[in-house]
Amino acid sequence: MLDIISKLIHENEDEYHDFKKEWYSPNKKDELIKDIFSFVNTAHHEDCYLIIGVDDNKRVVGIENDENRRNTQKLTDFLNNLPLANNAIPRVIVESLTIEGHTVDVIVIKDYKNVPIYLKEVYPSKNSKIHTKSHIYPGQIFCRLNDTNTAIDKTARDDLVEKLWKKRFGDDLTIEEKYKIKLSDIDNWQYSENGETRFLYKVDPNYCMYLKDDIDEDMRFKIESYSLSQMRIRVNWKILNLQYKDRLIKRFTVLFLDEYRFLTIYPQTFSLEQNFDKPLIYRFILADSIDFYVENFLLNQKNDFSPSADYFQKEKLLEGIVVFKNSEQKNRIDKKLKKNISAIREGVQPTDSQLESIQKKVTLAFHEKDEVSNNEIVAACRELNLGRYINDFIIYNTNEGNTINWFG
């Protein structure tokens, strides 16, 4: 947060941030509402910042002695007590930072989808003891355009409001972004095997995913690193087509694990070091990609007749797959890992007991001894160990934390 705000202080005000010299006094609660609503009612999909303790000339003056300061709880209580239409309550967080020897408060207005927000009753009401310079009326919509908020006695232009409604219903998004929203609505998908295997989005049947045979299955590996922790380690390959009407949006290679008991996507692959004999390869998913949303859907959908993972299967699967927040986090972690390649290589080598255990599972799963070679077993074990190593490294050796939300 400190890096973000320090950078913004040197930039001109825009649709993402605004400067305030001091906190809002009790008789300026209408201005506080207007300013927060204006940043909530933005057509973009980013958080916004009201930076308090910085004047219009971008000089840090601080709010150390400001008696009108509010913390997150007080500001949230204030918003909760407003007559908000549709009970739409924006999420705000107050952060205190030390910048240039002064205390600066930042109201973080989190990105909000259910816009526009507005009041359903006049504020303050006729019987209220609150005194403000102006009233805010029902249905009055405040927006932020460049560095300017809608005036307290005005309402936003129709073209700005139209953009807000498009944001609310996802009409401003690409088809992949729309698919992410539909996939997050897990309970409204229906699994069917009548004629063709598919997942149908009941709210809008134009969104449909079809499970197809993989024509390249015979050329693929029979085991994968992330299948080794399952009770049965053989994998079976399929193709999942995400379609909107008759249009193919994206094609995923997916796998049945644990004897067709659940589906998972084929994760991306990355090599920390190019070594032909013993490559340091791990599997990963980016949490801001559609891959993550498909994986989350497959692991958490609860149709009675569709294949889905139980807690044990899901936990074991995710041990060896690294889920990064985004590509930026992945690049940071890779850079740190590459500083200690020799120790990592030694630490992820399969032990004799691990290889013996996996060999027993292979013997049980395959009739032919040569279906899975010893080299494949060693490589899969090393890949699994590296995935586990990186997951532990992120949790215990960085300040990144494991904050991925599998929201199913």
Image (cartoon, rainbow, N blue to C red):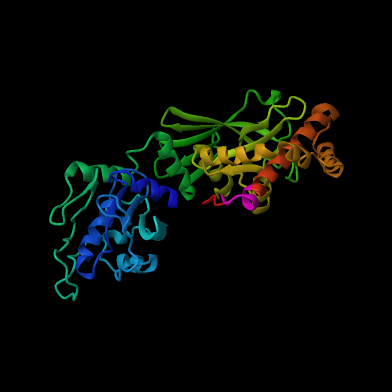
Magenta run includes residue 319? no
Left/right of residue 229 with respect to residue 54 in the rendered view: right
* Position of 317 relative to 26 (above/below): above
Does residue 176 appear anywhere in the picture?
A: yes
Total numbered labels = 0
Does residue 227 appear anywhere in the picture?
A: no
* Position of 100 relative to 12 (above/below): below
Tell which of 98 and 19 is nearer to you: 98
Percent coordinates x, y for residue 396 in the rendering: 65, 53
Q: Which residues fall within the magenta stretch?
A: 394-401
Tell which of 261 and 352 is nearer to you: 352
Tell which of 86 and 27 is nearer to you: 27
Residue 377: image quadrant is top right
**Residue at image location 68% in from the left, 33% down from the top:** 281
Percent coordinates x, y for residue 75 in the rendering: 34, 66
Residue 36: image quadrant is bottom left
Percent coordinates x, y for residue 29 in the rendering: 23, 65
Left/right of residue 209 with respect to residue 305 in the rendered view: left
**Residue at image location 14% in from the left, 72% down from the top:** 126
**Residue at image location 32% in from the left, 69% down from the top:** 65
**Residue at image location 40% in from the left, 61% down from the top:** 96
Residue 131: image quadrant is bottom left
Percent coordinates x, y for residue 127 in the rendering: 16, 76
